[in-house]
Amino acid sequence: MKVTINDVAKLAGVSMKTVSRVINNEPSVRKKTYDIVMSAVKELNYQPNLAARNLAGTSSFTVGLVYDNPNAYYVIDMQNGVLSRCRREGYELVIHPCSYSDENMVEEFQTMIKRSRLAGLVLTPPLSEQQDIIDLLESLDVEFVRILSGRPSQDENESKNCIYVNDYAASYEITEHLIRHGHTNIAFLCGDEEHKSTAERLSGYQDALKDNRLVFDEKLVYRGNYSFESGVQGAKAFLEDGNKFNISAIMGGNDEIAAGALFAARLMNVAIPAQLSITGFEDSPFSKQTWPKLTTAHQENDVISQHAARLLFSKIRGPRNLDKEIMTVFTPSMVVRESSNKSE
C-alpha cells in the first residue's frame, strides 16, 4: 500500500499539519520536531505528491537545470546528477536549454522562472558565467548555484553560490605528462573563447611550459571551438606543409577536439603516438571511441552536478539544514591511454 502523510504523522507522533509544515520547509518548525518527522519520512520512504504540493501552497517544489552545450554526453551527465538529488529531496526537475548568445536570453530566463514557479536553478557553463543572468536571479530572489571552471574566489558572495572545476590544474598535469615523455613542441587546440574553461585550460598549459623552462609560442595555439570539426581544422593547420612547426604533441581543449585532431592526423598518415601524441579533456565517450584511445582528464560531470544540486537544496532549506558533505571544488584527474604513450 502507498504510504500516506497520515502514516508519517502516526509514526512521528505529530499531527498531519505538522508533517505538512516540515515537508514544506516552513521556518517556524522546531529542529527537534523537524528531525523526528524527517526520520519517519525516511523510515517509511514517504514520497509526497509533488503536483499537490505545488498547487497547495506558496512554496515551489521544482528546480531547474539550464544549459547551453552541444555535447549530448555532457548534458545527460549533468541532468542525471541533478535528477538523482531531486528524487532524494522530493523535487521535480525542469530542464531548459538556452543560447547564451541570444539577445533575448534574460527575458527568456525571467519568463521560464515565473512560468515554472522554480524554487531554484543550477546553472552550467557558459550561462553560469553571464553576469546579467546572475543579476536577474538576485533581483528575483531566486536561489541558484553556478558550476564554474576555475578556482575558489576570494569573494565570499561568489563562492557561496559556486561549484568549481579546477580545469587549470588538470591541464597543467596533462602538459607535464607530455613534457615528461620528451615533447617540447606541443600545440594547443582551444575551445570557444567565450568559455572560462578555455582560458583556464590554456593557462594551465602555459604555466606548465614555463615551469619546465619551455617557451610559450602563440603560433602553437589554434583558436577554435569545442567541436570535432574544429579539431580536424586545427590539426591540419599544424600538420600540413610538412609540419613546419615540428609538432610532436597536440592538446585538445576537450575530447571532441582531440578526436577530430586524431582523425585528421590519421588521414595524413601520421602514426599515433609514434609520430604524434594527442590528448583530450573531460573523459567523455569520445575519448574511448577513437583508435588509439585518448589520454584525457576525467571529469565527473554527474557527481559535479549532484553536488551543485545538494548545495542548491541546502540554500533552499536554509542554514538550519546545512549539508556539510558538499564538495565545492573538483579537479579532473588524468587518465593515460594509448594516444600519448610515446617512450621517453
Image: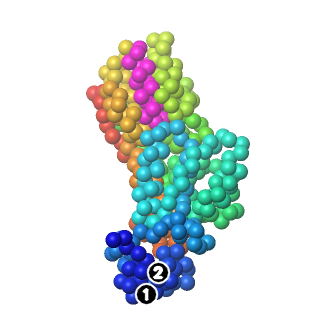
Residue in the picture at 57% in, 45% down: 97
Q: Is residue 153 visible?
A: no
| Residue 194: image location, x then y, percent | 61, 40
Q: Quadrant of the N terminus?
A: bottom left
Q: Residue furthest top?
A: 241
Where residue 340 sits, quadrant-wise, is top left
* Residue in view at x 70 percent, y 62 percent: 139
The secondary element bearing badge 1 is classed as loop
Query: Dot 1 corresponds to which residue?
Result: 14
Residues shaded magenta: 245-268
Viewer-proximal residue among 316 and 330: 316
Let me know if residue 261 is in the magenta part: yes
Q: Residue furthest front?
A: 1
Q: Contact (CB < 8 A) between labels 1 and 2?
A: yes
Query: Tag on residue 19?
Result: 2
Mark sitting earlier along the chain (1/2): 1
- Front position in the image: 330 or 310: 310
Image location (x, y in percent) of residue 241? 49, 11
